């Protein structure tokens, strides 16, 4: 009953045209197919080993009313669909249903997991059960910056982090990879990273500390109508070039104060990139015993200011250090306060 890969992530949106344009023009995805159903229509996008489905239509209005634009489904390939489905049902996830001939199980909030059989290249196989029509004149696979979906960050209610981690263990065979508690004084964030046995699916669960003042995670839960995907982290091989091209395409990234880079000089060993280069691009840096981790977070392009995106480059780093998690929290908090 082990999950192997993420086949696709599906974004429900009220404005499919704008959502597709953002992902194609600003982030470098390629439109590969379209599907039209009775109550919804979808566009399939690809880049590297990442597949995204963008869907709109009256059939998803309830999700949009409850949660706004956001990730509604994460397709898992697993070694045994029937056993994984049974394990999810036993873990009290909720009712299992069949949609388009596929097994669909609840995940968190309004997000589901479609369970799919294993394939050799899951991110290059169209999601089954839909009438996909290939895009005319589809170009060969390009050389976009995004290579893989590094991790999915999920924000859940305070005090329930362990429950969700246990659910992904019991239902999908994930194990706890790391955990971190970040205290910023009046606010705090708790996190648990869970990872599939294949090591190709990583979910970062984050939650506010209910014993502290309300902060950005509480605000996310309110805007999102409950738990949901906070961000998708895309792995790139050259973050400076990726940030430059995405910024030119229209992506707005969070800003970082100059004092951050002054402090960074005490701990960061310059190698492929120098501190001045990182500061010019506004890229954050962290390290662990294996190497360096570079990242930058976008502003949310969606009306409710929920889902956003991350570009991440790993120069040997395997983990999610405290500086990394704190950097995300502080960057989003700064942007939240400046906007308010």
Image (cartoon, rainbow, N blue to C red):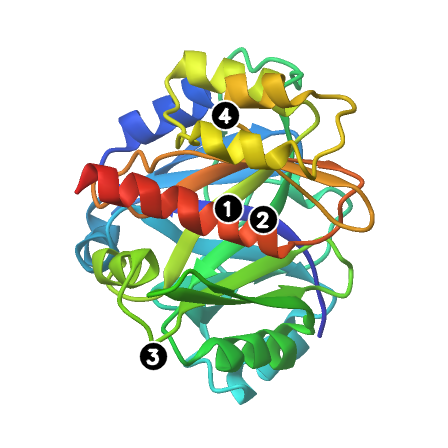
Q: Residue at x 61, y 82 (%)?
A: 87
Residue indicated by mark 1: 327
Q: Considering only order in the chain, which callout, 1 or 4, is on the residue closer to the N terminus?
A: 4
CA gap, disc 1 and disc 3: 22 Å
Q: From the viewer's side, name the closer residue of 97 and 221.
A: 221
In the picture, residue 121 is in which quadrant? top right
CA gap, disc 4 and disc 3: 33 Å
User: Where is residue 141 shown, x and y percent of the image?
Assistant: 66, 19
Secondary structure under the numbered disc 2 in the rendered image:
helix
Decide: few, some or many residues near mark 1? Use Cα within 10 Å; few <14, some 14-19, many ≥20. many
Q: Considering only order in the chain, which callout, 2 or 3, is on the residue closer to the N terminus?
A: 3
Decide: few, some or many residues near mark 3? Use Cα within 10 Å; few <14, some 14-19, many ≥20. few
Quadrant containing the C terminus is top left
Residue 282 image label? 4
Decide: few, some or many residues near mark 2? Use Cα within 10 Å; few <14, some 14-19, many ≥20. some
Decide: few, some or many residues near mark 4? Use Cα within 10 Å; few <14, some 14-19, many ≥20. many
Q: Are marks 2 and 1 in contact (CB under 8 Å)?
A: yes
Q: Are marks 4 and 3 in contact (CB under 8 Å)?
A: no
Instruction: From the viewer's perspective, tell me whether residue 260 is left or right of residue 122.
Output: left
Q: Considering only order in the chain, which callout, 3 or 4, is on the residue closer to the N terminus?
A: 3
Residue indicated by mark 2: 324
154 w.r.t. 119: above or below: below
Secondary structure under the numbered disc 4 in the rendered image:
loop
Q: From the viewer's side, name the closer residue of 285 and 35.
A: 285
Q: Considering only order in the chain, which callout, 4 or 2, is on the residue closer to the N terminus?
A: 4
Instruction: From the viewer's perspective, tell me whether residue 18 is left or right of residue 233.
Output: left
Q: Residue at x 48, y 76 (%)?
A: 161
Residue 240 image label? none
Q: Residue at x 54, y 11 (%)?
A: 137
274 w.r.t. 225: above or below: above
Q: Are marks 2 and 4 in contact (CB under 8 Å)?
A: no
Residue indicated by mark 3: 211
């Amino acid at each position: 009953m082990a999950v192997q890969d993420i086949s696709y992530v599906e974004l429900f949106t009220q404005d499919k045209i704008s959502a597709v344009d953002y992902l194609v023009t600003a982030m470098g995805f390629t439109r590969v197919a379209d599907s039209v159903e009775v109550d919804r229509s979808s566009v399939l996008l690809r880049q590297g080993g990442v597949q995204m489905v963008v869907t709109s239509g009256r059939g998803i209005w309830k999700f949009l009313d409850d949660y706004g634009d956001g990730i509604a489904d994460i397709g898992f390939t697993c070694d045994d669909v029937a056993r994984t489905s049974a394990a999810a049902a036993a873990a009290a996830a909720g009712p299992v249903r069949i949609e388009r001939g596929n097994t669909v199980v609840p995940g968190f909030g309004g997000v589901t997991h479609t369970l799919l059989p294993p394939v050799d290249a899951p991110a290059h196989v169209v999601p089954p059960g839909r009438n996909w029509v290939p895009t005319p004149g589809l170009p060969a696979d390009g050389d976009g910056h995004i290579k893989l979906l590094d991790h999915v960050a999920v924000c859940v209610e305070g005090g329930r982090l362990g429950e969700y981690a246990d659910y992904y263990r019991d239902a999908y065979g994930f194990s706890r990879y790391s955990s971190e508690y970040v205290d910023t004084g009046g606010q705090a964030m708790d996190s648990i990273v869970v990872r599939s046995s294949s090591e190709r699916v990583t979910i970062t669960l984050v939650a506010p500390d209910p014993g502290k003042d309300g902060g950005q995670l509480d605000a996310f839960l309110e805007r999102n109508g409950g738990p949901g995907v906070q961000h998708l982290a895309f792995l790139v091989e050259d973050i400076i070039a990726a940030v430059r091209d995405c910024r030119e395409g229209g992506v707005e990234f969070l800003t970082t104060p100059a004092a951050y880079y002054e402090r960074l000089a005490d701990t960061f060993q310059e190698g492929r990139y120098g501190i001045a280069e990182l500061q010019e691009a506004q890229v954050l840096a962290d390290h662990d015993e294996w190497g360096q981790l570079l990242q930058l977070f976008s502003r949310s392009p969606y009306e409710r200011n929920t889902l956003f995106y991350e570009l991440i480059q790993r120069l040997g780093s395997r983990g999610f250090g405290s500086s990394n998690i704190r950097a995300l929290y502080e960057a989003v908090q700064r942007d939240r306060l400046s906007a308010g």
